[in-house]
Every structure is written in structure tokens, then in C-alpha cells.
Amino acid sequence: MTEFEIANVVGTITYQQELNLAALSETFEDRDEITSVTYEPVENHWLQTRFAPDDIYVAFYRSGRCSIAGGKSVEHFETVVEQVNSVMRDLLEFEYNPAVEVSNIVATTDVGSNISLEALTVELGMEQTEYEPEQFPALMYRDSDAVILVFSSGKLLCTGLTDLQTVSEAIETMASRIQAVM
């Protein structure tokens, strides 16, 4: 089994109401668990915050949606969701459980040796790969929802998937296919 590291977990919380971003911005300024607040409606239509202790990026939208980026694991993402929901329950006084969704897990690994990206492109097939070394130094492989970047150094980056089992399977499959051309 190929080991991998989580680089980022991204997801959303959906509140069942419209958010007054200007009012939230003012309220957030006084919250200890929020380390920074930026609301510039002329430039952006969302409220940008960072939550302590990890300085996790959380964006709030008028529609009632909230995006979280920077989770170090699915468990870490879930902890941040609880923290955000705790703050929002204090402010909005809701009784329901907001919808939560992991929308992307970014994972990295290293297969331990250099890779001929030209040979791998042939192995994987031209339909699912893009490799233009003069444009970008990695081979880009698309398979259903996953995008895997393969670097000649042996490093892989997998993105676009939403659960750890699928991430693990995608990385394992790619590592096996790389072994076939080595």
C-alpha cells in the first residue's frame, strides 16, 4: 500500500438562512477564536476569516454557505466545522444541524524514484493525460473525479476526491501503473 499525506481538506457548511455579512464582520472582530476578519464588499462578495488556533481559512457567503480550506485531515476539518458551528449558533441561535460536505481532499505521496513522464503518458493513454513539459512540469492524469499530477521526481499530487478510501485507491492505482513503466 502506498502511504500518502493529506495536504488540504476543503469543504462547506450550509446554514438554512441568508447571512448579513456586514453584521457578522463586526461581531467576528470581538471573537477570540477568530484571528482575522476581512470584509470588503466592493472587492469581494464574501467575508474572509481565519479561525484559531491553526489559522484555518473560513469564508462566509450571503447565501448562507461557508467554505473551509486548510484542514490537515478529515478529523481536523470536522473539528473546525464544530468550532465554526459553535460560533454561528451563538450568533444565529439556530437549532438544526447545518449540512456539511467535504468537497476536496488534496493528498501527496512519493513513489521513491524518478519517472519517465513520456513513457507514463504512453502507458496511461493520451485520452486521460496531458503532458506539455514546456507549459507545466507534471503529467496531468484525469480519471472520473480525480486529477493526479505526476512529477518526474516521483512525487504525486491527487485532488478532486472527497473521501479517504477513494483517494487511497486512486494513489495506489497510479503507483501500480507507474511501476509498470519503470
Image (tube, rainbow, N blue to C red):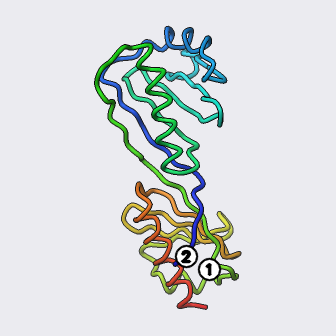
The image's mark for residue 2 is 2
For label 1, the residue is 117
Instruction: Give me the residue at 50% from left, 43% from top.
Output: 77
SS at mark 1 in the image? helix
Percent across and percent down for residue 57 are 58, 34
Q: Is residue 52 left or right of residue 165?
A: right
SS at mark 2 in the image? loop
The kind of residue on which mark 1 rests is Leu
Percent across and percent down for residue 161 are 43, 58
The kind of residue on which mark 2 rests is Thr
Q: Taking 67 as reference, is 130 above or below it?
A: below
Q: Taking 61 as reference, is 76 above or below it?
A: below
Q: CA distance from mark 2 to mark 1?
A: 19 Å
Q: Is residue 92 left or right of residue 45?
A: left
Percent across and percent down for residue 139 are 58, 71
Residue placed most toward the observer, 96 or 105? 96
Picture quarter containing residue 6? bottom right
Percent across and percent down for residue 17 are 32, 19
Mark 2 touches mark 1? (CB < 8 Å): no
Q: Is residue 102 left or right of residue 99?
A: right
**Front disc: 2 or 1:** 2
The image's mark for residue 150 is none
Label 2 Cα neighbours within 10 Å, binned few <14 / some 14-19 / many ≥20:
some
Instruction: Give me the residue at 40% from left, 33% from top.
Output: 13
Report the number of discs: 2
Instruction: Give me the residue at 58% from left, 17% from top.
Output: 39
Residue placed most toward the observer, 26 or 119? 26
Which quarter of the figure is the C terminus placed in? bottom right
